[in-house]
Amino acid sequence: MILPKLLHRHFQHHPLVTELQRDVHRISQKLLGKTTFNTLTEDPTALHDQQRLEITVLCAHALLLGLQLEDDSPEAECCALCLDLAVTLTHHLTTRAARVMPLLILDYIARAAYVTRFGAPLLDEEIMQVAALLVQRAATVHLALPPAWQSGGLADLLRQPTEQVFNQTAGLAELLDLPVDVEHEERAAALRDLYRRTPQAAGQFAALLLLAVAGRGVRSVPTLDLLDDAVWVLLLQKDLEREEQTPPQYAALQEHFKALHAELERPRLPSLRGPQVIAKRERELIVMRAVAALRLLRYQHLGRMHVEALANELMLYSLFERLDAELERGITLPDAPPIKAELIIATLLALSKTHRSPGGHLPVIVELAAQMCGVDPLWGWALNMASPRSAAATLPESVHLLCLALELLRYADVPMWTEVKPLAYRLISRFAGHMFAAARQAGLSFPEHRFLETYFSQFGVLPARTEQHHELLSGHEQLSALLASLVEARQVISEETPPIAAQSQEEGFEGQPVTLDLPPAHVMQAAQLLEGCRVVLIGGQPSPERHAALTTSLKLADLDWLDTELYAHGLHAASHIKPNTDLVILAIRWMGHAHNGLRDVARARGVPCVMHPSGLNPSSVAYQVLQQASEQLRRQNQGGVMLRV
């Protein structure tokens, strides 16, 4: 069985952990002396919602209580609850931290991957149920509760009635309603029928896993992991049918697996290598992993965003913010080598971290970054299809390490940078050399390959060989230790520096409009294409100043700018895309996921559509217009007004 030390390892030896532990301690100290949570008026960790703060503290204390219970009397159920609480606490705290250091979040999740495969994030009401269950368990074994549980905010929260006792598999049947493509409706109906006719839980789990693979209706579905989990529970189902002498359902489920596996071009799965025999002592782990995968699917199906997907997107948004600052100075991406190189590497990392199969949708920010960098959107999928022992299979890890090493450059303003700069440069050149060597062995090349090699050569000689696994682990530890020191140094600086007035989320990276005597060249080029046009801009918060700046700089005849709060999931906004509309701009960062439907509406009506990822200032908007719609606008201007539906 999984031991408590596995959970402790989940929270140790990473630069992010110090920050997370500081948050938990700070929150707890604020709440321990309160008689009720309602008396807390400040938000010490910048978590914007009071209830979120309360539930995070409850989750942290419940995990500590669960670990204590497991130390005193280890049981499988208690360990499973601790795993869920560990994953949930990671989600709660890293969701905030991801906005500041998304790359560290991705690294943290990668290191905790073994643990997170066996646990799933809990919903808020489930956290309360688990906490109540652990308190009851403590009373059963006569374990004295810590003072925090006996009075004050935690006690008040636990006294609130919960609708039901926690059950890990409760609600999984909701996955029967996952959306399915038209081509898979018949298979989905058959899998739903098998789910209802199968008495064993293993067979039901297999049906739900295969249904998720067939439908791919949940964003960022880890298709290959789901297929792999399905193989193991199918083998377990086969054994159980033989032992219990129940009507066989295994064969029918296996046929659906084979069909889906073939449809995905028969990717190599760990479960298909070696003897397919399950020892009885391993059955519990197989079920735990399948249940965790299904619960994560339900979590996402209910509209919650996985923290890894959030970190992926914020990593790219942060690079677009930096590009915005350069665009304001008239410097475009080809003339900004540091941002260009980091955007290419970050895009490769995002594609390798984004769970997707052919035919599935990419998050729009990842799709946009791939388009701007000239990266094949299926880059990550192609690597997943590679043999596990091939050089291609090591490329995602190589890109991950290089991207993390580049994060060191963000700390050049701390006093210790002069001392650690040589080591930082050695690590960057080391991991870049390893990445290029792995690509050569795999017969692959990167977009802008020559540019990337030239850029990374400035940090030192690029090694021509791939490193062994133990060498990479050692380098990763060295990199993590250095990042931890830099994060701590930055924290000291921020605590000593008086805070500045906060800007709104939307204006945080665009600030006040910058007035130049002569607009940048790319703004003038966009203005030539858009002069006299009617543009619909959806998303963000309109202001008279920025509305005037966009209209004047881009020489628009009309700018119809819809506030983020007004587009009503796209239905209201779609009515603004009229026959005389020349361009639609979707400010995707402030639109949730309604942008996919609005983009389809614009395309159906023959209107060019720009997915805009960053600041709503003329320079940034102009650049994205040129990147995404210049050819369409040019043809439209040459051919006169297009007839639109």
Image: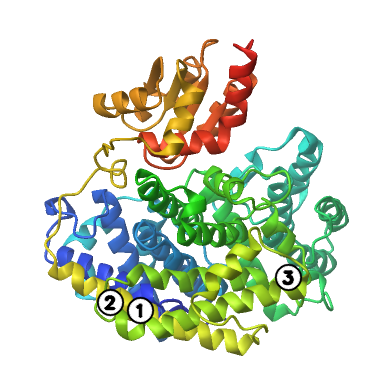
Q: Quadrant of residue 238?
A: bottom right
Circle 3 Cα neighbour tier, 10 Å, few/some/many (<14 / 14–19 / ≥20) = many
At label 1, the amino acid type is Ala
Of residues 540 and 111, the one drawn nearer to the viewer in this rendering: 540
Residue under label 1: 484
Marks 1,2: beta carbons within 8 A: yes
Q: CA distance from mark 2 to mark 3?
A: 35 Å
Q: Are marks 2 and 3 in contact (CB under 8 Å)?
A: no
Give how far apart the Cα atoms at labels 1 and 3 are.
30 Å
Q: Earlier in the sequence, mark 1 or mark 3?
A: 3
Horizontal and vertical percent for residue 610? 52, 32
Q: Position of residue 585 (x, y in %)?
A: 47, 29
Q: Are marks 1 and 3 in contact (CB under 8 Å)?
A: no
Residue 392 is tagged as 3
Q: Where does residue 259 sit, x and y in percent of width and height? A: 86, 51
From the viewer's perspective, tell me whether residue 236 is left or right of residue 98.
Answer: right
Vertical placement of 447 versus 636: above or below?
below
The mark that comes first in sequence, 2 or 3, is 3
What SS does tag 1 mark? Answer: helix
Q: Which residue is mark 2?
A: 488
Question: Where, quadrant-wise, is the N terminus in this rendering?
Answer: bottom right
Amino acid at circle 3: Ala
